Image: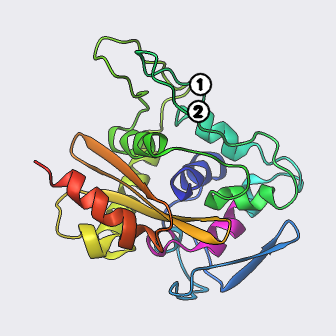
Amino acid sequence: MKIITSAALFDRAGLTPDSTAPCNTTQAASGEVFHNEADVPANPNATLLQAFTESCNTAFIKEGFDHLVHGGDDAADLHDEAHDVFGFGSWSIGRGVQTTDPSVPAAPSGRDKAAQFIGQGQVTASPLVMASVAATVRDGAFHQPVILADQPQTPAPQPMSPTTAGYLQRMMRAVATSGTASARLSTLSGVGAKTGTAEEGDGTNGWLTAYNGDLAVASLVEGGSSGVDSAGYVVWDLLTAG
């Protein structure tokens, strides 16, 4: 979700990858105290690029809440970015295949006004959706996945800004070469990636989405301790399958 949060910060708040985004050990917002994973180093002078590369939760909570929640109540900016630029809406991929539509609530309440920026709260997305997010960054435009080549594709209401696409490609490339996905993907030329984890009950699920050339993939490993050490192996196999 930090991919879409970053896009919203670029498009709606005028930030850049070089904007300051302090990575603190904890961050309070909406009456909740948010934490980072234990291996994320604190860096009060971090840039948004560095926070993205290290997957710093607290930086995205702070910048998201400061710039994208208006008057302490209107938190619709993330929903609007996801819907308008990344095509989060009702999908039909064809042949009667059922998919779960992605959802970023337009009016989150309580802690979810901050939690949404790191993909928590009521945010939902499938691996297919997250693969489309990576593809949108790589191509600079959303193309809804379909089964048949001649099936109509519903476009996103708004094209991605070329500047935003360039920023996101730079950041996802850094994740693959020197950040949280580098242990699996650093040897692959041109790959852009983003790792993630999601707490569910007493466990943690591992996520990784990536693109390479005209291929975009995503993996979710239920019970995966981290994105790179679980989903990372699946993504590596897909990107190198030939």
Q: Are marks 1 and 2 in contact (CB under 8 Å)?
A: yes
Label drawn at residue 222? none
| Residue 58 falls inside the magenta stretch | yes
Q: Residue furthest left?
A: 242
Q: Which of 4 and 8 is in front in this view?
A: 4
Return the residue at label 1. Answer: 90
Q: Dividing the picture into quarters, in which one does residue 198 lie? A: bottom right
Provide the residue span drawn in magenta.
52-64
Location of residue 105 with respect to 34 vertically, above or below: above
Q: Which residue is at 16% across, 60% downward?
A: 189
> In the picture, which quadrant includes the N terminus?
bottom right
Q: Which residue is at 44% across, 64% downward?
A: 195
The amino acid beneath tag 1 is: Ser
Location of residue 167 with respect to 86 vertically, above or below: below
For residue 149, side relative to residue 5 (left or right)? left
Please tell me whether mark 1 sits on a helix, a strand or a loop. loop
Q: x, y percentage for residue 229?
A: 37, 73
Neighbours of disc 2 within 10 Å: few (<14), some (14-19), many (20+): some
Q: Dividing the picture into quarters, in which one does residue 113 lie? A: bottom right
| Residue 21 falls inside the magenta stretch | no
Q: Which of 236 and 11 is in front in this view?
A: 236
Q: Which of 166 and 38 is in front in this view?
A: 38
Return the residue at label 2. Answer: 101
The colour scheme is: rainbow
Q: Which residue is at 56% across, 44% downward?
A: 125
Location of residue 239 with respect to 101 vertically, above or below: below
The amino acid beneath tag 2 is: Asp
Q: Main secondary structure of the magenta part?
A: helix
Q: x, y percentage for residue 236?
A: 24, 60
